[in-house]
Image (spheres, rainbow, N blue to C red):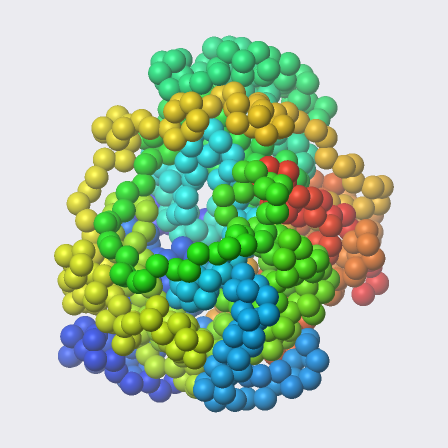
């Protein structure tokens, strides 16, 4: 990247950081060859785990101590640069709040009182409970909540045990509605990393997506590249985000009305015949019916709903059409907002379809991957009862397991009881809406095991806590990514764990041995597992260890380059009009319903991300907390004045059900509408085990007691809570 785009990247991503720290370590044999004999610095390629993006990194060890971490220039995801969180990743190794030893609960759940035990004692306890649960309730009574690639061996364990109840908040609390909306339209979802061709976009539309604050490294780098090349940026957001600062058009929409805007944009594009006719003639299904429905949604219709003027709606629709098919209406990622999220995402998919962007340069490319055989395990036992989360197929388009469905079954015992939870690297009390329901469900369990590197609120409710080595100290499963170019990436240990922490693969194997499932973990260690898979695929493990990745041949990624234009929908085409939705009792073309009005004196609570933190998982990292140690509540200036508040004052927020937040610092700003307030998610921890983060800032999760369930796929919409501002703190 040249100096201009690098500057842009830094402006968008926030400052990089310098780091230094100290702790002893031993040199790991596999990477001895990477020692620079002159400087004594050992460089080990691996991939980052401060978020789920899996950026290729090179860790530096100096004088036996973990010194710094940089991007791996060969890695297609990081392209040699980590985001600020990734750079601060070494703080995870030095974090004094880390879990250090296996723990068994000694008082009531939630009291955070533990006895430190040996690994063997912890595994014996778990195995005895698991065997009892299987005997009394069947294997389906065990569930796994997991986040990130580190959970792969626990998924394998739970499948081997006989349960299909494996889930992640990334579906029902995050990207699920988007993937359902796109599947219904194109037959395929957007996947992760998103198949968005941002760097080649000439017009980029961001709807509530605050790229740059929401720090998905490759996307932010591509955003900087697009900005540098002069792409026209259109941002729709009730808050003037960092991305809005780069926009040609900023639309400060009334929260909850995005679908109305999308319908009006499509109305303009259809009525002015600005769509890609050739593309639609070739690939579209039901365009005439779609066009007839869309005719009613004029910009004048949308204006009183969205507060966006008809003129601005027309100008921006024409701007998108001007650059088609190199216009990307970004599908977003965390899209569980108002309860109509799958249909809103479908409207985004339809707008992209009108512009002919799917499969096209500057729109959505077709991701490619390496061909790597799976490990030849014995077949998993078949589940008799099936999954517990979606009884009667209530949410007919849920193609992944619904976390809150498992929570509901744990609470009600229906359609059958769930008695054991494994929770891997996800703080369910911050990830799922309505903490109280989660706590009530936990009280019905016979076993809850939390596996993590740091304590969190969910850890406090566990029966057994298993401390995992951080990513710089362990192997995880091979990453066979679906991206622009095919590659396999390796996470490998850089340094030893400082205490009695162990890698997840080792724990899963040990639990399998103790529960009579040893045949599912026949390999001696993870290196043997990797060697088996890699040699079966014809790849060199030693090359992978040295480089951190093996890349495949470049492949075509656009229709114009020869990628077959295939749409695995029922019609085999892009479904402008969806008969499968109609048959299931839903609208074939999205409709719009006004969201609940904000009560007088209240504000809609909105939340988002910061570039230096990942969810609620980094608030004990000393480096990242140095950069941002509490969140702020954004309040419009006029409102602040009315309440006699200025930036830096503290308030509490109270939701409509009487829940009161920790105190939180005010950011009085013109950059947010008057009908909402905003805060960064992940702060306001109340676990005393998190000494550095305890009671710093406020928790949006605590205030999200209400949620609306998406009728198509069971996602939980969380932007439906209202708060009042309590001053005099
Ligand atoms: S986006 Fe940042 S935190 Fe996430 S994997 Fe990449 S470098 Fe790490």
Task: Tell me the quarter of the picture where residue 410 sits.
Answer: bottom right
Whether residue 624 is visible: yes
From this view, report whether residue 146 is shown above or below residue 135. above
Q: Quadrant of the C terminus?
A: bottom right
Residue sitting at 23 percent across and 71 percent down?
528
Residue sitting at 49 percent across and 60 percent down?
163
From this view, report whether residue 678 is shown above or below residue 313. below
Residue sitting at 78 percent across and 51 percent down?
723
Task: Tell me the quarter of the picture where residue 705 sits.
Answer: bottom right
| Residue 708 x/y as whole percent | 69, 44
| Residue 231 x/y as whole percent | 40, 32
Q: Horizontally, is 276 left or right of 728 in the view?
A: left
Residue sitting at 68 percent across and 64 percent down?
441
Task: Tell me the quarter of the picture where residue 276 sits.
Answer: top left
Q: Horizontally, is 513 left or right of 577 in the view?
A: left
Q: Horizontally, is 727 left or right of 370 in the view?
A: right
| Residue 352 x/y as whole percent | 45, 27
Give 486 or 700, whichever is nearer the viewer: 486
Q: Horizontally, is 239 left or right of 22 in the view?
A: right
| Residue 52 x/y as whole percent | 43, 57
From this view, report whether residue 145 is shown above or below residue 513. above
From this view, report whether residue 727 is shown above or below residue 253. below
Whether residue 681 is visible: no
Give 131 or 214, whichever is nearer the viewer: 131
């Amino acid at each position: 990247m040249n100096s201009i785009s690098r500057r842009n990247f830094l402006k968008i991503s926030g400052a990089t950081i310098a780091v230094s720290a100290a702790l002893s370590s031993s040199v790991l044999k596999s990477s001895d060859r990477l020692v620079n004999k002159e400087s004594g610095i050992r460089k080990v390629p691996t991939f980052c785990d401060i978020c789920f993006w899996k950026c290729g990194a090179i860790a530096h060890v100096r004088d036996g101590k973990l010194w710094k971490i940089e991007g791996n220039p060969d890695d297609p995801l990081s392209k040699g640069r980590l985001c600020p969180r990734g750079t601060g990743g070494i703080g995870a190794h030095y974090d004094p709040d880390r879990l250090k030893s296996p723990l068994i609960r000694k008082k009531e759940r939630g009291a955070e009182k533990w006895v430190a035990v040996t690994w063997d004692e912890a595994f014996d306890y778990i195995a005895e409970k698991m065997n009892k649960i299987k005997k009394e309730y069947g294997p389906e009574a065990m569930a796994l909540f997991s986040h990130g690639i580190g959970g792969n061996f626990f998924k394998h364990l739970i499948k081997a045990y006989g349960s299909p109840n494996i889930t992640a908040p990334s579906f029902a609390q995050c990207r699920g509605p988007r993937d359902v909306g796109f599947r219904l339209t194109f037959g395929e979802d957007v996947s992760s990393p998103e198949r968005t061709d941002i760097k080649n976009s000439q017009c980029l539309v961001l709807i509530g997506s605050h790229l740059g604050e929401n720090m998905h490294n490759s996307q932010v780098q591509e955003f900087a590249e697009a900005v540098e090349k002069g792409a026209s940026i259109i941002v729709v957001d009730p808050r003037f985000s960092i991305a809005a600062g780069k926009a040609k058009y900023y639309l400060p929409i009334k929260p909850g009305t995005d679908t109305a805007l999308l319908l009006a944009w499509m109305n303009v594009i259809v009525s002015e015949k600005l769509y890609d006719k050739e593309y639609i003639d070739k690939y579209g299904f039901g365009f005439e019916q779609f066009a007839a429905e869309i005719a009613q949604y004029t910009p004048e219709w949308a204006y009183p709903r969205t507060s966006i003027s008809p003129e601005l709606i027309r100008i921006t629709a024409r701007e998108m059409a001007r650059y088609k098919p190199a216009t990307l209406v970004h599908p977003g990622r965390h899209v569980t907002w108002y309860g109509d999220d799958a249909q809103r995402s479908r409207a985004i998919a339809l707008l992209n379809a009108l512009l002919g962007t799917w499969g096209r340069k500057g729109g959505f490319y077709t991701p490619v991957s390496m061909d790597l055989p799976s490990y030849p395990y014995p077949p998993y036992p078949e589940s008799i009862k099936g999954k517990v989360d979606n009884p009667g197929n209530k949410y007919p388009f849920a193609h992944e397991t619904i976390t809150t469905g498992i929570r509901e079954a744990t609470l009600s015992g229906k359609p059958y009881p769930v008695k054991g939870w494994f929770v891997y690297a996800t703080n369910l009390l911050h990830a799922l809406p309505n903490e109280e329901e989660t706590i009530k469900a936990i009280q019905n369990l016979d076993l809850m095991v939390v596996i993590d590197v740091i304590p969190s609120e969910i850890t406090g409710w566990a029966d057994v806590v298993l401390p995992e080595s951080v990513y710089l100290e362990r192997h995880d499963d091979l990453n066979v990514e679906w991206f622009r170019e095919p590659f396999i990436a390796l996470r490998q240990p850089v340094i030893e764990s400082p205490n009695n922490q162990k890698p997840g693969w080792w724990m899963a194997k040990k639990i399998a041995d103790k529960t009579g499932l040893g045949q599912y973990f026949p390999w001696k260690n993870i290196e043997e597992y990797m060697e088996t898979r890699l040699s079966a695929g014809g790849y060199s493990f030693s090359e992978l260890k040295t480089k951190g990745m093996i890349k495949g041949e470049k492949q075509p990624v656009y229709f114009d380059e020869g990628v077959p234009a295939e749409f695995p929908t029922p019609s085999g085409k892009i479904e402008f009009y969806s008969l499968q939705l109609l048959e299931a009792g839903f609208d074939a073309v999205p409709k719009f319903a006004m969201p609940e009005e904000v009560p007088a004196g209240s504000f809609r609570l909105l939340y988002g991300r910061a570039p230096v933190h990942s969810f609620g998982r980094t608030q004990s990292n000393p480096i990242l907390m140095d950069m941002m140690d509490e969140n702020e509540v954004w309040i419009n200036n006029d409102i602040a004045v009315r309440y006699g508040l200025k930036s830096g004052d503290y308030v509490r927020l109270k939701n409509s059900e009487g829940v009161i937040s920790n105190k939180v610092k005010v950011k009085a700003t013109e950059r947010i509408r008057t009908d909402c307030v905003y805060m960064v998610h992940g702060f306001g921890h109340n676990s005393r085990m998190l000494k550095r983060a305890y009671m710093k800032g406020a928790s949006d999760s605590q205030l999200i007691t209400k949620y609306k369930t998406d009728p198509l796929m069971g996602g939980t919409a969380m932007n439906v809570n209202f708060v009042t501002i309590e001053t005099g703190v």
